[in-house]
C-alpha cells in the first residue's frame, strides 16, 4: 500500500451512494487519454491480450466488493486526447452511456502536448461543473509517472492545477503520479525495463493496483453520506 496521504477521500459521491442504497445497477464511464503504462514494445512483440488495463479490472474489483450488485465499466478513453478534446465530447458520451459516475483521466497528454496550463485547468473545471449539473458523479485520475518522461516534460504545473480544480469543484483525485512514484521508489515497479515480458508484468502490476485504489476510493466516497 501507499502512504495514507495519497489515499485520502475528501468528497462524497451522491449518485453512487443512491445506487448502492437502492441496490440498483451502477454504470461507470472512463474518459480521457488511454493509459500508456502498457508500453508499445511488448504490445507489438508479445501477447498483448495478456494485459488488462485498470478499467477492465475495475469492474471486477467493484463487483467483488459489491456482491449481488451489477457494475458496468465503460472504457471510452482514447489515446492522445487532451482535456479540451474530452470536454467537447462529454455531452454525447453521457447520452450514449448514461453513467452514474465518470472517471476522468487528465493531464498526461496535455503536458506532453504542452497545452496552455490555464486552458487545461479552465476547461477541466468547466467539464466537472457540467457533469455535476447533470447529476453525474465524477472522480479524477491525475498524470502517470515514469522517471524517463518526468525528466523530459514539466508535469508539475498540470498536476498542481488539476489538484486545485479537484478541490475547488469537490472532486476526489486518485493521485496516480505519486502512487506510481512511490511504487517505483520502493522497487515494486520498474518503468525502465525494456524486456517485453517484464514490461507486461509491470503494466499488469500497476493497473491492478490502480483498479484496487480506484475501487476503494469510489466506495469510501459513496459511504460518506448520512443515513
Image (spheres, rainbow, N blue to C red):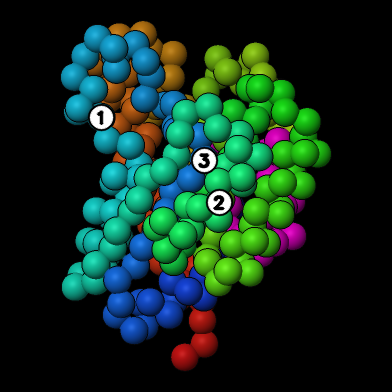
- Residue under numbered circle 2: 90
What residue lies at 33% left-to-right and 37% top-to-bottom?
53
What residue lies at 77% left-to-right and 34% top-to-bottom?
117
What secondary structure is the magenta-colored segment mainly? helix
Indicate left or right for 124 with 72 as reference: right
Residue 125's disc number: none
Q: Nearer the viewer, mark 3 or mark 2?
A: 2
Q: Secondary structure at mark 2?
A: helix
What residue lies at 72% left-to-right and 28% top-to-bottom?
115
Q: Nearer the viewer, residue 99 or 110?
A: 99
What residue lies at 51% left-to-right and 81% top-to-bottom?
225
Above or below, 187 against 99 in this view is above
- Residue under numbered circle 3: 32
Read off the magenta span. 158-177
Above or below, 109 against 72 in this view is above
Q: Secondary structure at mark 3?
A: loop
Residue 51's disc number: 1
Q: Which x, y percent locates residue 204?
A: 29, 32
Q: Is residue 33 magenta?
A: no
Amino acid at each position: 500500500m501507499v502512504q495514507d496521504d495519497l489515499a485520502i477521500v475528501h468528497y462524497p459521491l451522491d449518485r453512487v451512494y443512491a445506487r448502492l442504497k437502492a441496490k440498483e445497477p451502477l454504470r461507470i464511464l472512463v474518459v480521457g487519454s488511454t493509459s500508456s503504462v502498457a508500453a508499445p514494445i511488448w504490445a507489438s512483440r508479445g501477447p498483448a491480450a495478456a494485459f488488462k488495463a485498470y478499467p477492465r479490472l475495475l469492474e471486477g474489483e467493484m463487483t467483488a466488493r459489491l456482491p449481488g450488485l451489477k457494475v458496468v465499466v465503460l472504457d471510452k478513453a482514447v489515446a492522445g486526447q487532451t482535456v479540451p478534446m474530452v470536454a467537447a465530447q462529454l455531452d454525447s458520451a453521457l447520452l450514449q452511456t448514461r453513467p452514474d459516475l465518470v472517471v476522468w483521466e487528465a493531464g498526461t497528454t496535455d503536458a506532453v502536448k504542452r497545452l496552455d496550463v490555464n486552458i487545461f485547468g479552465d476547461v477541466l473545471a468547466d467539464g466537472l461543473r457540467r457533469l455535476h449539473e447533470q447529476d453525474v458523479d465524477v472522480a479524477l485520475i491525475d498524470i502517470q509517472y515514469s522517471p524517463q518522461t518526468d525528466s523530459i516534460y514539466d508535469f508539475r504545473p498540470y498536476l498542481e492545477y488539476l489538484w486545485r480544480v479537484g478541490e475547488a469543484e469537490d472532486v476526489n483525485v486518485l493521485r496516480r503520479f505519486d502512487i506510481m512514484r512511490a511504487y517505483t521508489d520502493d522497487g515494486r515497479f520498474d518503468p525502465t525495463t525494456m524486456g517485453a515480458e517484464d514490461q507486461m508484468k509491470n503494466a499488469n502490476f500497476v493497473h491492478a493496483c490502480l483498479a484496487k485504489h480506484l475501487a476503494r476510493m469510489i466506495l469510501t466516497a459513496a459511504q460518506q453520506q448520512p443515513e
